[in-house]
Amino acid sequence: MNYETLYSIINLSVMPAWLLLAVLPRASITQTLVHSGLYPLGLGVFYIVVMVMTLGFGMGAEGGSFNSAAGVSQLFSHPLGILVGWSHYLVFDLFVGAWQARDARRRGVPHLALVPCLFFTLMLGPVGLLLYLIVRKLTGKGGWSLVEA
């Protein structure tokens, strides 16, 4: 299997979770798949395998490391490094999106106000989180704090 195929597979693997958060937020399948930790576990295993291949077995870019900006740049210059970084983003963006959905439900944030936040979290991570916090503030359902309600 080539790098492009793996990239496409991991990219597409999170789409059902995002769709469930947006379209069926209260469904049992959403609770089971998205809020259970199955996605972070699955993608986390992929991440660990690719990370070990890259750094542990030297299958990535020579000189790649997390010790300097140049090392990180070198790490991401190889397709395995791209898969490491991209799977990292996918896991954490989905984790944040799932948290937003749970937090919105607890606080009574209207779901239609949450959906754009989920989209921007999927596409631009921190922008979606910031938008969600703004929505909470504007709707009077919370402020800037990430403390659980």
Image: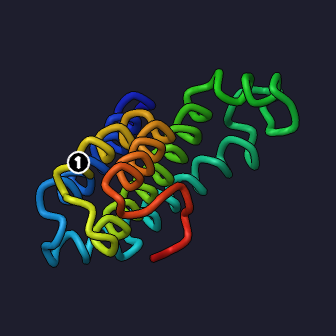
- Residue found at x 65% / y 46%: 53
Depth check: 71 or 37 in front?
37
* Farthest residue, direction right: 67
The residue that appears at 13% across and 73% down in the rendered structure is 27
Residue type marked 1: Val
Q: Position of residue 90 (x, y in %)?
A: 44, 46
> Quick check: 63 above or below 21?
above
Q: Nearer the viewer, residue 109 or 58?
A: 109
Residue 22 screen position, x and y as percent:
19, 53
Q: Is residue 90 left or right of residue 21?
A: right
Image point 44% across, 51% down: which residue? 133
Mark 1: secondary structure:
helix
Callout 1 crowding tier (Cα within 10 Å): few <14, some 14–19, many ≥20:
many
Q: Nearer the viewer, residue 101 or 76?
A: 101
Question: Is 42 placed left or right of 78 in the picture?
Answer: left
Quadrant (top left, top right, bottom left, bottom right) of the C terminus:
bottom left
Snapshot quadrant of residue 48: bottom right
Q: Is residue 11 above or below residue 141?
A: above
In the picture, which quadrant includes the N terminus?
top left
Instruction: Please tell me how many numbered marks the rendered image carries.
Output: 1
Residue 39 lies, with reference to residue 35, above or below; the image says above
x, y percent for residue 85: 58, 38
Asked which colour scheme the image uses, the reply is: rainbow
Residue drawn at the location 41% of the way across and 72% of the way down: 37
- Provide residue 131's location: percent of width, then percent of height: 40, 42
Which of 120 and 8 lies nearest the eye of the viewer? 120
Which residue lies under the disc numbered 1? 115
